[in-house]
Amino acid sequence: MFHALADSTRRDIIGRVLRAEQSVSELARRYEMSFAAVQKHVAVLERAALVRKQRRGREQIVHGNADTLRKAARLLDRYEQLWRHRAQAISDILSEDSGKSEKRTDK
């Protein structure tokens, strides 16, 4: 999922299809790349469950999957909390060590 989100074009595609469903052809007209390249971006997003495609006649309509994005956001929130806790623990340890060093030099 995060590999799929790492690319700016794919993030833009997700933003567009979350606002309104679009065909792959409509998406391809918005980018300075080939239709095939846009199809590949959509395929990466689809494998990551960030979008889903639905065939309508000759077109493939792309829909955003907000549930998967919410899962990613929750996961990132948990990692943020974890790293904030670890950073605070390191800060506390360094403050303790600094306090001990100051007491030694005061003697």
Image (tube, rainbow, N blue to C red):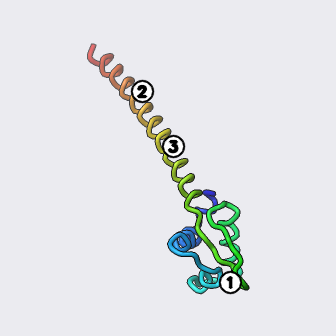
Query: As shown in the figure, which amino acid type bears the numbered disc 3?
Result: Arg
Q: Quadrant of residue 3?
A: bottom right
Q: Nearer the viewer, residue 21 or 31?
A: 21
Q: Nearer the viewer, mark 1 or mark 2?
A: 1
Q: Residue furthest front?
A: 57
Dots 1 and 2: beta carbons under 8 Å? no
Q: Position of residue 83 (x, y in %)?
A: 48, 40
- Residue 15 screen position, x and y as percent: 52, 70
Q: Residue at x 55, y 47 (%)?
A: 75
10 Å crowding of disc 1: few (<14), some (14-19), many (20+) = some
Where does the image place residue 81, in percent across and percent down from the top left?
46, 41
Question: Callout 3 environment at 10 Å: few (<14), some (14 to 19), or many (20+)?
Answer: few
Identify the residue under disc 1.
35
Q: Which comes sooner in the sequence, label 3 or label 2?
A: 3
Amino acid found under the numbered disc labelled 2: Ile
Which residue shows up at 66% across the image and 72% down it?
A: 42
Distance of mark 3 from mark 1, alpha carbons? 37 Å
Whether residue 3 is situated above or below residue 24 in the rendered picture? above
Q: Nearer the viewer, residue 59 or 97?
A: 59
Disc number for residue 93: 2
Helix, strand or loop at mark 1: helix
Cα distance between the residues tagged 1 and 2 = 55 Å
Q: How far apart are the two marked residues, 3 and 2, measured between alpha carbons?
A: 23 Å
Q: Is residue 89 above or below residue 21?
A: above
- Mark identifier at residue 64: none
Above or below, comparing residue 32 to residue 43 in the picture: below
Q: Is residue 53 left or right of residue 10?
A: right
Residue visible at 61% across and 57% down?
2
